[in-house]
Image (cartoon, grey):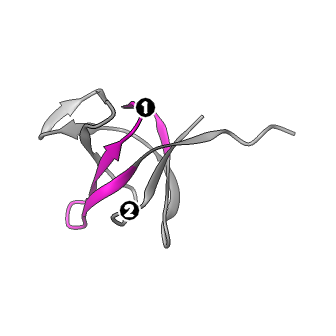
Amino acid sequence: MSEPSEERLIGKVSHYFSKIGVAVLDLTQTLKVGDSIHIKGHTTDFSQSVTSMQIEHKTVEQGKPGEPVAIKMDQAVRQGDQVFLKG
């Protein structure tokens, strides 16, 4: 039996733009395009991979702690949802 993959908290959702399906994340750890994340909140619980990321409307390959990064979401998320990096 394989061990469950380890997850670590890397930030939270600060804004969600439902019309365009984009969330702004406040990061406490580095996040890169290609990473797999798990979003968890009161009514939110899903995983997805990061296919693209923007900071200040510019496409970037990674976001660092303290930088607000915008990510296209597969499902709706809510302000305050926690973001975990899947290990």
Q: In this rendering, which labeled residue sits more in front, label 1 or label 2? A: 2
Q: Nearest the camera: 8 or 46?
A: 8
Q: Is residue 13 above or below residue 85?
A: below
Q: Residue furthest right?
A: 1
Q: Which residue is mark 2?
A: 80
| Crowd around label 2: few <14 · some 14–19 · many ≥20 (10 Å) | some
Quadrant in which residue 65 is drawn = top left
Q: Residue furthest bottom?
A: 43
Residue 66 point in image, percent of width and height? 28, 37
The residue drawn where x is 49% and y is 73% is 43
**Label drawn at residue 14:** none
Ranked by sequence position, the earlier of labels 1 and 2 is: 1
- Where disc 1 sits, the SS reads loop
Q: Main secondary structure of the magenta part?
A: strand
**Which image quarter is the C terminus in?**
top right
The residue drawn where x is 25% and y is 67% is 18
Q: Are marks 1 and 2 in contact (CB under 8 Å)?
A: no
Residue 67 appears left or right of 29: left
- Where disc 2 sits, the SS reads loop
| Crowd around label 1: few <14 · some 14–19 · many ≥20 (10 Å) | some
Q: How many marks?
A: 2
Residue 24 point in image, percent of width and height? 26, 51
Residue 49 appears left or right of 68: right
Q: Which residue is mark 1?
A: 34
**Which image quarter is the N terminus in?**
top right
Residue 34 point in image, percent of width and height? 43, 31
The residue drawn where x is 38% and y is 62% is 80
Q: Amino acid at mark 2?
A: Gly
Q: Which residues are magenta?
A: 12-37
How far is mark 1 from mark 2, CA to CA?
23 Å
Q: Amino acid at mark 1?
A: Gly
